[in-house]
Image: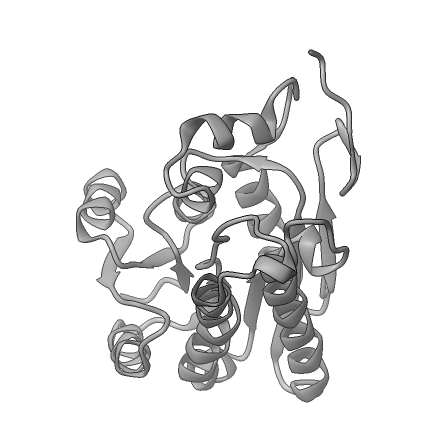
């Protein structure tokens, strides 16, 4: 294998799966990483460029094993998309479910750091590495009921900004993507413990929320700019969402 390699975490659904498909179309050999083997196998059956790797970003051993697999593929490792993450609950700080907050920090923040640490030597070795950190507008602006998620995403944003400073002078770009309202099959459903009514209410009356492929398009666009061009931060919202707290709804 000699084609350039991209690694996408959280690749089993939503933005991650859409990004895998976009990267395949752009000519990358894609390592799709997630916990659900059946979803990854489906992607690999659909796209011949995909190498599925079942791994948990909260595991040091899995991150090390991932780096070994990626390093053994033979091609230059040019891109890491830290997409694995998510939200749990919408509790206020005074009622915080600390287990949920811990999970959000472990997956969104420490997962990003863990996988980045494991793959950074390979990205640097390629001479044209790019690290994409998928954060959120919640990493820039807080909102009621989003304290845990916003705290995790603020921390993830801080990691991206710090990493860019620390890698200055080395051939690795750091890109932060901050989506606003994105309607996927699982994000809101998972956040509300499978409550379909609560999940649907998030997008009620919004005619055109963003979808996973919109964000995947942005990710691949930033990653395929000439390597001397670094898109530090890209904030992406649907037209209906003027700000975190202002959304036009047709009810």
Q: Nearer the viewer, residue 56 or 53?
A: 56
Above or below 2: residue 95:
above
| Quarter placement of the N terminus | bottom left
Q: Nearer the viewer, residue 204 or 147?
A: 147
Q: Quadrant of residue 233?
A: bottom right
In the image, taking residue 58 as reference, residue 215 lies left or right, namely: right
Q: Quadrant of residue 172?
A: bottom right
Q: Tell me, what colour scheme is on the image?
A: one colour
Above or below 184: residue 155:
below
| Quarter placement of the C terminus | top right
| Residue found at x 39% / y 56% | 10
Q: Position of residue 107 (x, y in %)?
A: 44, 67
Residue located farthest toward the top when viewing the structure as drawn: 251
Q: Position of residue 103 (x, y in %)?
A: 43, 66
Q: Nearer the viewer, residue 44 or 126?
A: 44
Q: Is residue 227 visible?
A: no
Q: Position of residue 182 (x, y in %)?
A: 58, 37
| Residue found at x 51% / y 36% | 213
Q: Is residue 147 visible?
A: yes
Looking at the rendered structure, the number of numbered marks drawn on it comes to 0
Q: Position of residue 155 (x, y in %)?
A: 64, 72
Q: Quadrant of residue 150?
A: bottom right
| Residue found at x 30% / y 73% | 70
Above or below 50: residue 53:
below
In the image, taking residue 152 as reference, residue 169 lies left or right, namely: right
């Amino acid at each position: 294998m000699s084609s350039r390699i991209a690694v996408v975490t959280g690749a089993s659904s939503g933005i991650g799966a859409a990004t895998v498909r976009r990267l395949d179309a752009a000519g990358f050999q894609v390592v799709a990483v997630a916990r659900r083997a059946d979803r990854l196998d489906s992607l690999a059956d659909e796209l011949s460029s995909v190498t599925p790797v079942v791994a948990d970003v909260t595991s040091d051993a899995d991150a090390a094993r991932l780096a070994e697999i990626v390093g053994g593929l033979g091609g230059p490792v040019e891109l890491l998309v830290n997409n694995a993450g998510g939200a749990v609950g919408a509790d206020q700080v005074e009622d915080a479910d600390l287990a949920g907050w811990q999970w959000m920090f472990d997956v969104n923040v420490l997962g990003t750091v863990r996988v980045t640490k494991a793959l950074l030597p390979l990205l640097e070795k390629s001479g044209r590495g790019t690290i994409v950190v998928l954060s959120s507008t919640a990493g820039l602006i807080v909102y009621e009921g989003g304290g845990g998620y916003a705290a995790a995403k603020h921390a993830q944003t801080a990691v991206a900004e710090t990493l860019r400073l620390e890698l200055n002078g080395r051939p690795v770009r750091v890109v932060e993507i901050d989506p606003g309202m994105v309607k996927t099959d699982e994000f809101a459903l998972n956040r509300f413990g499978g409550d379909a009514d609560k999940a649907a209410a998030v997008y009620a009356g919004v005619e055109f929320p963003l979808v996973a492929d919109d964000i995947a398009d942005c990710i691949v666009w930033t990653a395929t700019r000439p390597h001397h061009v670094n898109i530090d931060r890209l904030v992406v919202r649907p037209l209906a969402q003027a700000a975190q707290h202002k959304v036009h709804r047709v009810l």
